[in-house]
Image (cartoon, coloured by chain):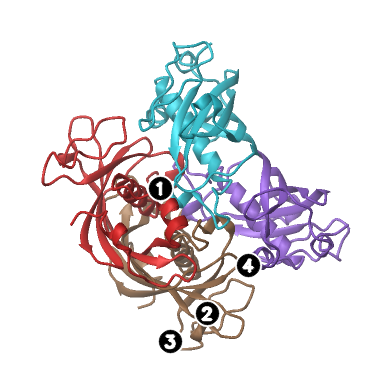
Chain colours: A cyan, B brown, C purple, D red
């Protein structure tokens, strides 16, 4: 995993390494925290989705346009998260996304949230939360599962 | 303002008093708090909306059905909130709603959030937050302002 | 599972049946939905927590008081959710909570979100989402796992 | 107002112009939207706070460190928002922050949310929402108003 730029949201250069994994920076604001003084655990699902959205965008997939043109949307059908260490106000996080399993009607994404620290690169950043997210491709009105069109399926790395 | 039942969400009995104002109980959970140890201020807009929604329901107005049948929705166009005292985890709040000004295309609602305490009724409950919310009636697709149908307008107290 | 009252949040009478499971009503507001027209999936974690909080309260456990007196809090360490059907604006949900596994430093809770319908009791309510949540008991400052005091542990059904 | 870089969060170069106003880019994700198909209005308070937080950071003020060292925090005491046009999924917004009034115990900030469009700079970006936010400096335990230390007060432009 490459060391992300400090301030600019940017995808890892996928050509740089066979191990390159998409990563997205997230900053923690008051809205993300709870009275325990740490990030409210449900918000990691939001962080994971922001990273997946930007990963899709990096593959040329804009979800609003996709919905307008195809009448279908991606929906989350299964989430499994494990929380290791808490994040706090003002922390900078790195959120990864990578495909574990790719089908014609669904996919499984593995994601991690790491704490960006001043003296370390992303490779040695402490792991805060990791998750496995299953996404389905469904009709936006009926929510019935359907097969992705070939043009969409082809956007994903094989 | 009547003293609300301890556990059951219920509108004040409007016939009981000319001063009767709609009120709705809200309990504070972890999701509502921030690292300051108090309720995150943006969430009072959510509490006000829950109370307005239940107030509309008490007038016979179900928003999803209304959207399906009329193609129009209520949208918030102006909010002004003043924060007086913080609320904390496990607190029980009382959230009021009452019309200040009623038009054919918009209305202004006054709302208060009070802290329910064991030894006091709602009348003497400490004021935590108060707000003025302007609501418009708009086309759900174009978001253009429009006049409420008479059947809807007639639901509101004159 | 008993049929909950229509408007009043209330725990099922645990003495009524060996099958009695705690349940809590949740109403869907605009804040809970997303542009897909359905409830945003991350919010089910909030609904599950509201139900767990009220279940704890029904066992005599108030989390803010517990933190103040013990210096410890419950934290979520693992969540696994499966989404079956979407909920929509104005829907009434029933959210259950029951212990699957109880230890001295952690517990596993099984939870379901059901759609309350006019013509059915909770027993036949459609299942929208189900989850398994692992909760740990930790020091509120260091977040180190610790053993529950006997007085707390004794609050839970054996 | 300067034209912000397309992808990188960055403060406007304050030396570039006497009219330079702090601005911060925000991208709209599913979490920000509601069933009306637009951004949920309460979320503009979050966007405004993200921009204020980054504006404070650009002035050398890190809120978590400030709380740890001073025992005080900034709290929001008054908000007034006017909503002009809706934002939608995938939209890129520009959120500004500038001081209207600066005191020793509180300040008033004016903020705008603009829609970033492909063919226009920020100067001609459509105005979506504008607000006036009053911030107080309070003791983090008692929430009593207090005067800012000179070292903090001096961070703000006079």
Which residue in the protein does label 3 denote? B19
Residue B131 or C156: which is nearer the viewer?
A: C156
Residue A24's image quarter? top left
Does B69 sit left or right of D100 as displayed?
right
Rendering quarter of residue A27: top left
Mark 4 surroundings within 10 Å by alpha-carbon count, few (fewer than 14), some (14 through 19), many (20 or more): few
The circle drawn on residue B12 is 2
Percent from the top left, x then y, of residue A146?
56, 24
Whole-angstrom CA distance, mark 3 to mark 1, is: 34 Å
In the picture as drawn, the residue positioned furthest to the left comes out as D18
SS state under label 2: loop
Q: Secondary structure at mark 4?
A: loop
The residue singled out by tag 4 in the image is: C7
Mark 3 residue element: loop
Report the side of D114 relative to A60 (left or right): left
**Within 10 angstroms of label 3, few (less than 14), some, or many (20 or more) residues?**
few
D13 to C6, vertically: above or below = above
Mark 1 Cα-neighbour bin, 10 Å: few <14, some 14–19, many ≥20: many
Return the x and y of residue A65 as percentages of the image width and height. 37, 28
Same chain letter for marks 3 and 4: no
**Residue indicated by mark 1:** D36
Residue D80 position within the rendered picture, expressed as x and y whole percent measured from the top left: 29, 63
- Host chain of mark 2: B
For the question of whether residue C77 can be seen, the reply is: yes
Q: Residue at x 78, y 49 (%)?
A: C107
Gap between marks 1 and 2 measured at Cα: 30 Å
Please tell me if label 3 and label 2 are on a single chain. Answer: yes
Q: Position of residue D53 (x, y in %)?
A: 35, 49
């Amino acid at each position: 995993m490459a060391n992300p730029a400090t301030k600019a949201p940017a995808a890892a250069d996928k050509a740089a390494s066979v191990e390159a994994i998409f990563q997205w920076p997230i900053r923690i604001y008051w809205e993300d925290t709870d009275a325990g003084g740490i990030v409210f655990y449900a918000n990691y699902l939001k962080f994971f989705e922001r990273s997946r959205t930007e990963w899709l965008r990096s593959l040329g997939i804009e979800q609003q346009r996709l919905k307008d043109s195809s009448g279908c949307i991606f929906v989350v059908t299964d989430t499994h998260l494990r929380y290791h260490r808490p994040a706090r106000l003002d922390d900078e996080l790195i959120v990864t996304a990578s495909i574990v399993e790719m089908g014609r009607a669904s996919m499984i994404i593995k994601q991690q949230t790491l704490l960006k620290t001043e003296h370390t690169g992303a490779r040695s950043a402490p792991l805060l939360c990791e998750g496995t997210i299953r996404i389905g491709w469904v009709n936006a009105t009926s929510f019935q599962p359907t097969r992705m069109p070939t043009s969409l399926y082809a956007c994903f790395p094989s």
